[in-house]
Amino acid sequence: MLDVIGLTSAEEELYRCLLQLTVARVDDLVARLQRPREQVVAQVEALRAKGLVQPTDTDPDAPLRPTAPDVALGGALLRRQEDLEAARRRVTQLAEEYRSGLRRHHVDHLVEVITGARVLRDRLRDLQNAARTEVLWFCRANPLAMAGPENVEEFDALARGVTYRAIYERDLLLEPGALTDLAKGVAAGEQARVLDRLPVRLAIVDASTAVCPLVPDRDGGEPSAAVIGRSQLLDALLALFESHWRVATRLRLDDPLSGAAAENRRPDPEDHPSDGYQPDADEARLLSLFVAGVPDKSIASQLGVSRRTVQRRIADLMAAAGVDTRPGLAFQVARRGWL
């Protein structure tokens, strides 16, 4: 099994023999393995070159002892894993180029229909792993194939420079732990916005491939989706995303204050005149949820404070904005560019 990282079966057997003996000379290994001496000498030298065997002192005829295999072979194993990962990404890219070629020459390949949650989840993962520039998401509540915490591919893509823009339905923010998961993505570089409702579920990768479910959520059963290549249909989906992005509310999900600090913190209109006041990260997070229409009770739960604290801090922000109604605060948030 270790031949994949350059260790032959004969070398592995010799190394195992040396592990059993702890310390041995070449002649001991010849006798134990019943092999020609020159063959054993060559295999010992190969193991020394791989860092698996070393002499006990500087004497050329000194006994040999084994070294830790994880130290000696760990680097080779890691390189092998990296090579396999690079090959997997290349195969994914070639598969997409193959599908693109078919779509260019055959109209019936412009749209591919896939069925089943697992198939849909695997395709979304493959597309993200192959993404080079940008991934766009319409994220509705009650995911069909892949919940937010399962989408680890996003973090790998963000780390290699891929841009992520995601629009979330307001109801999704009310699910337990949702904002915590979103905050991790935003911290990694995701741009997140929210709307009350989204027309469809949608993912678009590199402006070249879109995935859009075909059956309404309420119909139940196995989900099916269309994988759409470069076409006027894809252009229409891109325009749909951009039109919703322009009107969506930005989500500010910096780490909020908690405990006593959150209970006691409040803006001071005397220190921050309403015409120059700028909310800090904690206040911006509260405002982004407020403007998105999240109820006070849910905001309190997500921020880890009491409902009364949320109401008090919204009142303080209204005072800082110079308004006495919540709609007025929402208007001032937009006018002053607080988000």
Image (cartoon, rainbow, N blue to C red):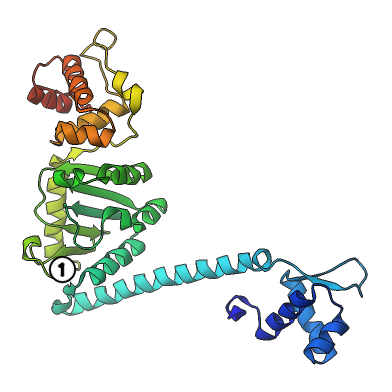
In which quadrant of the rendered view does residue 305 lie?
Answer: top left
Q: Position of residue 173 (x, y in %)?
A: 20, 43
Using the image, determine if residue 17 lies above or below residue 123.
below
Kindly identify which residue carries mark 1.
223
Residue at 71% across / 72% down in the picture? 50
Task: Give the amino acid type for the residue marked by disc 1 in the picture.
Answer: Pro
Task: Describe the element under mark 1 as helix, strand or loop.
Answer: loop
Q: Position of residue 208 (x, y in %)?
A: 24, 63
Crowding at dot 1, Cα within 10 Å, few <14 / some 14-19 / many 20+, comes out as many
- In the picture provided, is 51 more to the left or to the right than 327? right
Using the image, determine if residue 337 lies above or below residue 188.
above
Residue at 91% across / 66% down in the picture? 58
- In the picture provided, is 62 more to the left or to the right than 101? right
Q: Position of residue 171 (x, y in %)?
A: 14, 45
Residue at 6% across / 65% down in the picture? 219
Residue at 20% across / 17% down in the picture? 316
The quadrant of the rendering that contains the C terminus is top left
The quadrant of the rendering that contains the N terminus is bottom right
